[in-house]
Image (spheres, helix red, strand yellow):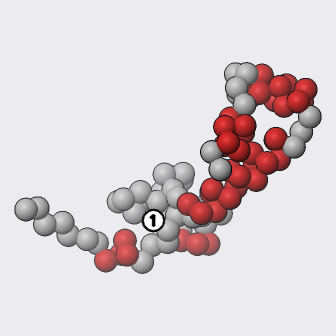
Amino acid sequence: MKIVKIDDNLLHLPDCLYLTERGKCEKLSIEDCQGEKCSFFQTPTENALQKQRWAEQLSSLDDCLQKKIAKKYYAGSMPWKEEAQNR
């Protein structure tokens, strides 16, 4: 059986989407997590809500405009349609 030592400092870090298991930030190249005051701080729940709003916003556009956006930014696919179907 392997015993894992947990760093007490990791227990005090926020539940940020970009926080690695080692307590480092995936988004920024900084030494220590800035916590909730960081401008990139985002919980998994907030990320899910943001994706939902993104999908709803793009889905509300007319089909012609959606196709233009899909062609220009998403190689012709419409990931917001898939996101809406997954809910």
Kind of residue at disc 1? Asp
Q: Eyeballing the image, is 22 above or below 63?
A: below
User: Would residue 38 appear left or right of 58 to someone viewing this image?
Assistant: left
User: Would residue 16 appear left or right of 71 to someone viewing this image?
Assistant: left
Q: Label 1's element?
A: loop
User: Would residue 41 appear left or right of 8 to someone viewing this image?
Assistant: right
Measured as percent of width and height from the top left, residue 66 is found at: 84, 31
Measured as percent of width and height from the top left, residue 26 is found at: 48, 51
Location of residue 23 (image quadrant)? bottom left
- Which residue corresponds to the image point at 62% horizontal and 72% vertical from the top-left? 37
Location of residue 3 (image quadrant)? bottom left
Measured as percent of width and height from the top left, residue 44 is found at: 56, 60
Measured as percent of width and height from the top left, residue 55 is found at: 75, 45
What residue sits right under mark 1 in the picture? 32
Q: In the depicted view, which residue is nearer to us: 5 or 64?
A: 64
User: Would residue 4 appear left or right of 67 to someone viewing this image?
Assistant: left
- Which residue corresponds to the image point at 49% horizontal and 72% vertical from the top-left? 14
Q: In the depicted view, which residue is nearer to us: 24 or 66?
A: 66
- Which residue corresponds to the image point at 77% horizontal and 22% vertical from the top-left? 71
Location of residue 5 (image quadrant)? bottom left
- Which residue corresponds to the image point at 49% horizontal and 68% vertical from the top-left? 15
